[in-house]
């Protein structure tokens, strides 16, 4: 993966960039829920919206950390 985008799934971010796990946990974007509607299977845009996070700022921050 070259760049994290709005359509990148949370699980993909965790697999490709495990160093972002703690940061995603702080934002409540990495939780232990499981199943087909787990936040881990959501696209970043959906997860950010659910948590009330600004997607643009989040993308800038995540990509600056990789």
Image: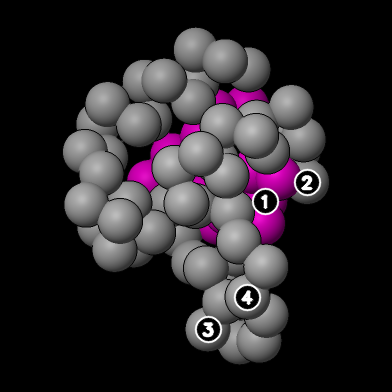
* Disc sitting over residue 12 in the figure: 1
User: Cα distance, mark 3 to mark 4?
Assistant: 9 Å
Residue found 63% across the figure and 75% down from its top: 33
Residue found 67% across the figure and 68% down from its top: 32
User: Cα distance, mark 3 to mark 1?
Assistant: 15 Å
Magenta span: 1-14
Q: Nearer the viewer, mark 2 or mark 4?
A: 4
What residue is shown with label 2? 15
Q: Nearer the viewer, mark 3 or mark 1?
A: 3
**Does dot 4 land on a helix, a strand or a loop?**
loop
Check whether the beta carbons of the residues at disc 4 and disc 1 lie within 8 A of each other: no
What residue is shown with label 4? 33
For mark 2, does the 10 Å Cα neighbourhood hold few (<14), some (14 to 19), or many (20 or more) residues? few
| Residue 45 in sight | no
* Disc sitting over residue 37 in the figure: 3
Check whether the beta carbons of the residues at disc 1 and disc 2 lie within 8 A of each other: yes
Point out the image quarter for the C terminus.
top right
Residue found 57% across the figure and 15% down from its top: 65
Dominant secondary-structure state across the stretch colored magenta: loop
For mark 4, does the 10 Å Cα neighbourhood hold few (<14), some (14 to 19), or many (20 or more) residues? few
């Amino acid at each position: 993966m070259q760049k994290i985008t709005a359509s990148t799934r949370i699980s993909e971010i965790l697999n490709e960039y495990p160093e972002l796990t703690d940061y995603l946990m702080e934002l409540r974007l990495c939780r232990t829920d499981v199943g087909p509607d787990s936040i881990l299977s959501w696209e970043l845009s959906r997860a950010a919206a659910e948590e009330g996070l600004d997607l643009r700022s989040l993308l800038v921050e995540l990509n600056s950390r990789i």
